[in-house]
Image: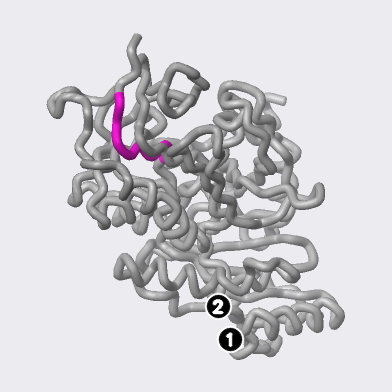
Amino acid sequence: MKPEPHDVVVVGSGLLGLLVAEQLTSKGRRVEVLVSPGPDPRSDSQRNHSWLQSGLLYPGNIHARKMYYDGLEMLDHFGFSAPIKRGIFRFSCQEEVDAFLGHAEKIRLRGQVKDIPDVEARYRLGVFFQPGHFHFEVPDAPFPEAELMEAARARASRLGATFHQCRVDLKRDESSTNGYVVVAGHRRLVPRTTIVCAGAGTPKILRDLDLPHPLVVNQSVLLVIEGATGVRVPLLADRTTGFTLVTWDARESPPRGRLVVGAAERRLVSTEGEDIDRRTQSDEEDFLLRLIPSSLNIEKRMYRFTPGQKTDVLVEGRSTVAPWVHAPTQFPGLILGTPGKATLAFAVAKQILARIEAEIREVSGLHSARHPDEPLPGAPWRDPIRAHSDACYDPPKERETDENS
């Protein structure tokens, strides 16, 4: 089957893929986005904390200084306000506090960090308050990631981008002009430019192209509790245990009324198979449940688990939060990227755009070589973008009861 030429194809429709599509179309580029099949594409952007991070979590990380202001620029670009309510970081000893405040000074956020007395911390944290700890207000807070993704998709669509749901792979092909083809469904495409924003699927694509890379995929299970009350803070991060808590209230936009609970326990997931294992393990689930105060009185029908995955970069053998953009010289027109954190996604999208602008400029005419009435594989993607805070996104997993054990 003869490969079909195309202009710009974006593989992946998570936050980064949608931001790249929006940036390209705003510059007048013709873009087609290939989306994983299914009613709810399983984007990791939609499964994580939706956390606008300040970089205060990452002492010694060279990207920490950029996280907060890059995130604010992303929100402002789409007309979203910066979060008004601020989160709380908790520490168990003075040494942790000293290191934290020193890091805040280095990344120029010391002025946005405020010491919180116990009486205020007790009021704001409710059942999650722990006496004898140090509490600080920080600019970290949830942000409406699903709504922002929807805004990016809508703007890109208005400017001419098209979205297609289909199975996507990249394969070496020495006969093509770029040395590879995009296999979309049963079609073989040769885009002039291919931008891979496949998140946790990126290592498999790199492996299929026989490209070495520093990426690893880590999974942490999140506990989503419906109808939880009594917490008056949008975010809590316990820096000693790694425990994190993000809250959503139905009276606010986006709605809260749910708790999204995580912990520092992560496991490396295999990227060797056709699809990444997204199952949650019972010991991970039990570990998260033990972190919930008994006074919260949650029942089985009130909670569910969702696997959140993120792609990290290995630096000297250690998994590091960092953006990664790569253009392999042996495959002209191919760019792969991952932001490391959602807060950095807009900056990475602009970086990708800057890297391909010169190459696209050299191409005379940006009209697709295929017939304009010939559709790409798969159904058009118009389904609502849902986040983990949507009660319908992850169906509850049935846990064994005492009667069935």
List the single residue furthest toward the left. Answer: 373
Residue at the image point whose x is 85% and y is 82% from the top? 94
- Please say whether residue 16 is visible from this viewpoint: yes
Where residue 149 appears, as percent x and y from the top left, is: 36, 53
Q: Please determine whether, in this image, residue 101 is positioned above or below residue 58.
A: below
> In this picture, which residue range is highlighted in magenta?
5-12
Image coords of residue 217 (percent x, y): 65, 41
Crowding around mark 1 (Cα neighbors within 10 Å: few <14, some 14 to 19, many 20+) is few
Q: How many marks?
A: 2
* Residue that carries the numbered disc 1 in the rendered image: 112
Q: Is residue 43 magenta?
A: no
SS for callout 1: helix
The image shows residue 253, relative to residue 39, as above or below, that is below
Q: Nearer the viewer, residue 238 or 402?
A: 238
Residue at the disc numbered 2:
139
Quadrant position of residue 148: bottom left
The percent coordinates of residue 251 (x first, y second) are 36, 68
Q: In which quarter of the view is residue 91 placed?
A: bottom right
Quarter of the image with the N terminus is top left
Q: With 20 as the anchor, is 112 left or right in this view?
A: right
Secondary structure mainly formed by the magenta segment: strand
